[in-house]
Amino acid sequence: MDVRSQISMVFHLDKCIGCHTCSIACKNIWTDRGGTEYMWWNNVETKPGTGYPTRWEDQESYRGGWEVKDGELRLKSMSKARSLTDLFHHPSQPALDEYYEPWTYDYQNLFNAPEGDDQPTARPVSMVTGRHTEIKAGPNWDDDLGGSPVYAANDPNFSNLNDEQRAQLFAVERLAMFYFPRICNHCLNPGCVAACPSGALHKRGEDGIVLLDQTRCRGWRACVPACPYKKTFYNWKTGKSEKCILCFPRVETGQAPACFHSCVGRIRYLGVLLYDADKLELTASLPDEELIEAHRDMILDPNDPAVIAAARRNGIHDSVMESARKSPVYQFVKVWKIALPPHIEYRTLPMLFYVPPLSPVLSSKSEGVIKNETETLFHEVDNARAPLAYLARLFGAGHAAKVRYALKKELAVRLHRRALEVGDLDRAAADRALLEADCTAQEAEAIYKLTALCTFDDRFVIPPSHREMAIEMLEDPQERKQAAGFGFLAGPRRGA
Amino acid sequence: MFPITFLLLSALAALPGRASDLAPDPQDFAQNCANCHTIGGGRLTGPDLKDVSGRRDKEWLLKFVVDPKKMLDGGDPVAAELYKAHNNVLMPTIAGMNAARVEQLLALIDAESRLEKSRFSGLELINRPLLPGDVLDGKALFLGRKPLKNGGPSCVSCHSVGGMSGLGGGLLGPDLTGVFARLGGEKTLAAWLISPASPIMKPVYAARQLDPRDILPLVAFLKDAAQQGRPADSIARLAFLILGLLGAAALYVVLDSLWGARLRGVRRSMVNKRSEAHDV
């Protein structure tokens, strides 16, 4: 057993209201520099939709992530031979048009325009060329199902829906959507790290945050096609790639990352997970349907004495273990099993988990009266507006069982609370739902509490990072203090 | 690029000649004049220079030797007459030639003219009749199948000749099919080849002189080529162009298949497809 600690995340999609506050918080802190205008380390997508960059889930085109070939895990985007032929051009790298051409507006014109018959306008100006531009796409162009005949209809996750199911999803009365906020998943088996020819990308030993060293990056851009979630970006101004850093300067000082901190719907949870690194390669090369279970098996119980002993051998501090025991992520992922990894079939073993969303109630309108169509107060999982097959494509590697289990449990918690609070539901019906969902009343209460009544401290259990210890493993702080001045004297730039 | 480099080199090669102001320099004559001229040995490419001072006005000689092309272009009647009389072969302008050098050369020629037999009365290279085997030998040398004895580059790198198969020779130098006739026979051609006077060949072969044993077969080959009289294949040039185009096309095909699965505009094609369907 090779115990490692990893800062992991859960996004509760049932609570996301799609306000993009997280994206703005991230943008303002990290990507408001030259060359990063088009980057959104955090973005919120509407599903069904094509996302950012357009159709990023279509790995036939983008060739991100891993595949099992001859019993071995291989990067889809790279091989030894291809690293030579693709040295200066990665054939599956998204172009700017797949992201969008960033723009601002000619605000000065509002003040400086000469007197005329019409109101002056602020025309859009491209932040790449500096010229007036016509906006063709944006990072959330398909927000709230905007342009859905083009965008939502091309969602790659419809691959295993039949035509009838598709037609149903787009029928006006049934139309459903939900939001899918995305950041770097800080994967256990990151494709970007494996693809980097310069060794600039690394997974931090103490907390598993995947970082890109700006001084070692040589701008080969191999990471961009290799990441199946398209969460590494190339900065055209510095000539280096960049990615989400999980706000590590904030995390190291005990604050939640900016996107977590600013989340209006309080959908984000952060905490430590312990995992067994010995199982990594085997897990990542299993068949699709076994991936979720095996991934969950890698996560270790922080209360198990054997795990505690092994963790101590690996130098994991007791305070981190304590934090792991309080981790909300552990509850969602391992105990309640209602948080699932996104697209685990890409085999990077993401450590950001999603609680799948329940669909809105299915109702119909006749003679001015809106009628609930389901017998039980809420909808049935198998007959939800967002088809189970669709959610299974996103969170179940194409297999519905794990998604159904999660949704049933979420629904059971709702029914349980409805019976308790409102009382218009038969207690026996609620208990039956709990039983069917493999959930006790006690567990339902716990889920309810962490979902609806959670405070900052419940949601963010940030482990003390012990940077002083981590640093001492690499260098002597005393020596560094004497040898180096302070400050970041040379910013990242081309050729350095 | 290359001609400029060669010109610079030839200018450098001429420097010592300009520097010696003292006495007539036989080396200068041997290197720059003897390939076309003899003193009392009869005509080669250019006229025999024995007693040339007596035949021509000194001032004219000074001007002509420094820049023959200027004289011809300037409409000088004597230059025009000489040009016509020598198969339209104009004396090359020697890099670094100036009045002082010409004076020295003239002094040397005058001195040599007074001798019974000048050392520049012509070299006896062709001392046996040319054999049919020499033609084949010469062809091998010309095409570079057989290396030149002193390691100089083969003729084919810069020249083409009639009856060559394939893509023909290089295009930097002139077609050599008629050179035998133009220069005026075996002796002249051989003399030219000992130390070629053209500004490009001169520096190239200065360090790797053609060996007399190479010159004989080459002369035989060029004589044969002149007798056959077939001009160099103009199709060869076209073939070269077409082959180049085909090669480029083949390269594109290879690269396209190598990157066949590359990403081609996901968003734009998606939106265009939809709006096309909508228009119909």
Image: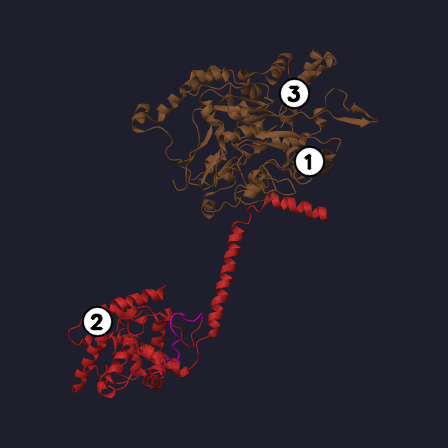
Chain colours: A brown, B red
Label 3 lies in what chain?
A
Asked if residue B178 lies in the magenta stretch, the reply is yes
User: Marks 3 and 2, Cα distance to the nearest angstrom?
Assistant: 101 Å
Q: Position of residue A111 (x, y in %)?
A: 57, 38
Mark 1 or mark 3: name the one nearer the start of the chain: 1
Disc 1 designates what residue? Answer: A161
Give me the residue at 46% from left, 26% from top.
Answer: A248
Residue at left offset 61%, top offset 32%: A45
Is B90 left or right of A445, judged from the image as shown?
A: left
Judging by the rendered image, the residue that carries numbered circle 2 is B17
- Answer whether residue B144 is magenta in the image: no
Chain part drawn in magenta: B166-180
Res B18 → quadrant: bottom left
Of labels 1 and 3, the one closer to you: 3
The N terminus of chain B: image quadrant: bottom left
Q: CA distance from mark 1 to mark 2?
A: 91 Å
Residue count near mark 2 (Cα–Cα under 10 Å), binned few <14, some 14–19, many ≥20 = some
Q: Residues within 10 Å of mark 1 (few under 14, many from 20)?
A: some
Amino acid type at image mark 2 = Gly
Q: Amino acid at mark 1?
A: Leu
The chief SS type of the magenta part is: loop
From where the camera sits, is residue A367 visible? Answer: yes
Residue A59: percent from the left, percent from the top? 57, 39
The secondary structure type at the circle numbered 3 is helix
Crowd class of label 3 (few under 14; some 14 to 19; many from 20; radius 10 Å): many
Q: In this view of the protein, which residue sits in the foreground, B145 or A161?
A: A161
Can I make out residue A105 in this image?
A: no
Q: Badge 3 is on which residue?
A: A410
- The quadrant holding residue A466 is top left
**Mark 2 element type:** helix
